Image (tube, rainbow, N blue to C red):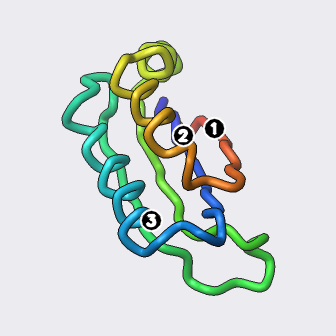
Amino acid sequence: MTIHHIILYRFKPEATPEQRQSVEDSARALASQIPAIQSMVAGETVYNPLGHGFDIGVIFLFESAVKLDEYRPHKAHIDYQAFTAPYIEDKLIFDIETA
């Protein structure tokens, strides 16, 4: 079983390109800071009229729900949330389990 932890971000209009990039770079860095993360991918949206205006997406893979539960309270994750909060207007988090 694998858990796909999917996060979509919509930036505040005033977020600069550098701030937007720092959010993505910081997300990528989490994979080396949190052992529970099996792998991750991140990238900017490819236009889709049903994309609801989200700008970037991040997908973390975890080998189990237990590993996802280890990730959530991890200090690096909490610090990441605090760092990115000033730039984020909205986010959608969706977890799926695959065989």
Element at badge 3?
A: helix
Q: In the visual, does 75 lie left or right of 32? A: right
Work out how far the residue at label 3 is from the one at label 1, CA to CA, in angstroms: 23 Å
Q: In the visual, does 12 lie left or right of 75? A: right
Residue at 32% of width from left, 23% of height from top? 36
Q: In the visual, does 75 lie left or right of 44? A: left
Residue at 63% of width from left, 86% of height from top? 47
Residue at 63% of width from left, 39% of height from top? 96
- The mark closer to the camera, 3 or 1, is 3
Element at badge 1?
A: strand
Work out how far the residue at label 2 is from the one at label 1, CA to CA, in angstroms: 5 Å
Element at badge 2?
A: strand
The amino acid sitting under disc 2 is: His
Q: Earlier in the sequence, mark 2 or mark 1?
A: 2
Foreground: 76 or 45?
76
Q: Give yes or no for contact between labels 2 and 3 (Cβ–Cβ under 8 Å).
A: no
Residue 82 percent coordinates (x, y):
49, 33
Q: Which mark is residue 31?
A: none
Residue 59 percent coordinates (x, y):
47, 50
Q: Which mark is residue 95?
A: 1
Q: Earlier in the sequence, mark 3 or mark 1?
A: 3
Work out how far the residue at label 2 is from the one at label 3, CA to CA, in angstroms: 20 Å
The amino acid sitting under disc 3 is: Arg
Q: Which mark is residue 5?
A: 2
Note whether 76 is above or below 70 in the view shown: below
Q: For label 1, count other residues whose C-alpha is less than 10 Å away and answer few (under 14), some (14-19) or many (20+).
A: some
The residue at which mark 3 appears reads as 20
Q: Earlier in the sequence, mark 2 or mark 3?
A: 2
Q: Give yes or no for contact between labels 2 and 1 (Cβ–Cβ under 8 Å).
A: yes
The amino acid sitting under disc 1 is: Asp
Residue 13 percent coordinates (x, y):
65, 71
